[in-house]
Amino acid sequence: MSLTPAADIPTDAALVAALVTAQHPDLAGPLRLVSDGWDNQLYRLGDDLAVRIPRREVAAHLIEHEQQMLPGIAARVRARVPVPVRVGVPSAAFPFPWSIVDWIDGVDGASVTAAERSGLAEPLAEFVGELAVPAPDAPGNPVRGVPLRTRVEVVGTRLRSLSGRMEVAALEQVWREALAAPEWEGPPLLLHGDLHPGNLLLTPASGLAAVLDFGDVTSGDPATDLATAWLTFDGEARERFRAALPTPPDAATWRRARGWAVTMGTALAMSSDDNPRMASLARHTLDQLSADD
């Protein structure tokens, strides 16, 4: 069984309350855990705020990347993003960074069907286009924005593991085609890095309320974020998303984007047996890739 990565940083509401009281006492208030993700936990703080705090040491520095990059991102994209309103600094009580952000109401994109996400095609394309500017000084990320050839070993291992659970021939073909596509030769462009439906909030009318979780923010091959075409949408909405992109991707970039969808979809599939929400997203992604020609 492939499980969600285990937490190795112990946190609870009492610790979070103590951190807020010590560093931002004017914001202290009732807390409740609302999300326990792969890398971070989210505690709602009163009605209007939330505390984002790491649960795994390997990813703790990613909150610093969000603190560094989100103010500039918010200034250039129309979609709402969770800019930190206060920064929590490492201390004797908790030796890692953490953030206080505005609470944003919305519907979790991974909790609804692809049909219900179809209304995101145009606003998400707009977000991707607005975000993708040259950003050579963005944080480095060894698993996002990099040439696909650097992911050959890990993706191959995942595909071999999945072969005992599902048919992978079509995925292997998509992966080979992506590896054969010319690599990105342009400047490194700013990337969200993890643009799947679980990091999208929908309005009640299925519009885009916000884009969340910028822990993997980096720069590099824009095909990385274009993988959302398969993670988020079905065929009809995927074509609308592609058509709405401000800069239409060429054939090579679109092939690499399919490869990035294989990379992300197989990662989800290998670590979500205990998480029905993410397991469903993995199945959707891999089914879309297998059916897409």
Image (cartoon, rainbow, N blue to C red):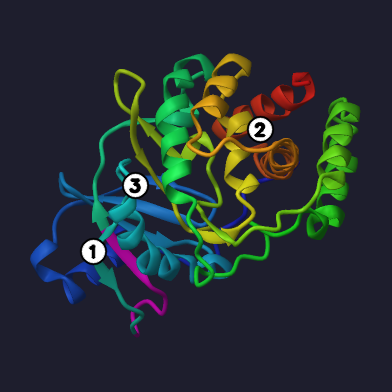
The residue to which callout 3 is attached is 77
The range drawn in magenta is 92-100
The residue singled out by tag 2 in the image is 282
Image quadrant holding the N terminus, namely top right
Q: Nearer the viewer, residue 140 or 154?
A: 140
Query: Going 49% across and 51% down the picture, which residue do you hit?
Result: 132
Gap in Å between the C-alphas at discs 1 and 2? Answer: 35 Å
Residue at numbered disc 1: 17
Give the amino acid type for the residue marked by disc 2 in the picture: Ala
Q: Quadrant of residue 119?
A: top left
Q: Report if the CB atoms under discs 3 and 2 are less than 8 Å apart.
A: no
Disc with the residue nearer the chain's start (1 vs 2):
1
94 in the magenta segment = yes
Q: Is residue 266 magenta?
A: no
* Dominant secondary structure, magenta: loop
Q: What percent of the width, then of the height, locates residue 7?
A: 54, 60
Disc 3 or disc 2, which is closer to the eye?
3
Mark 1, Cα crowd under 10 Å, few <14 / some 14-19 / many 20+, is: many
Looking at the image, residue 263 sits to the left or right of residue 226; the answer is: right
Q: Quadrant of the C terminus?
A: top right
- Tell me the element at label 2: helix
Snapshot quadrant of residue 63: bottom left
Q: Is 148 displayed left or right of 215 in the figure?
A: right
Q: Select label 1 or label 3 by which is in front.
A: 3
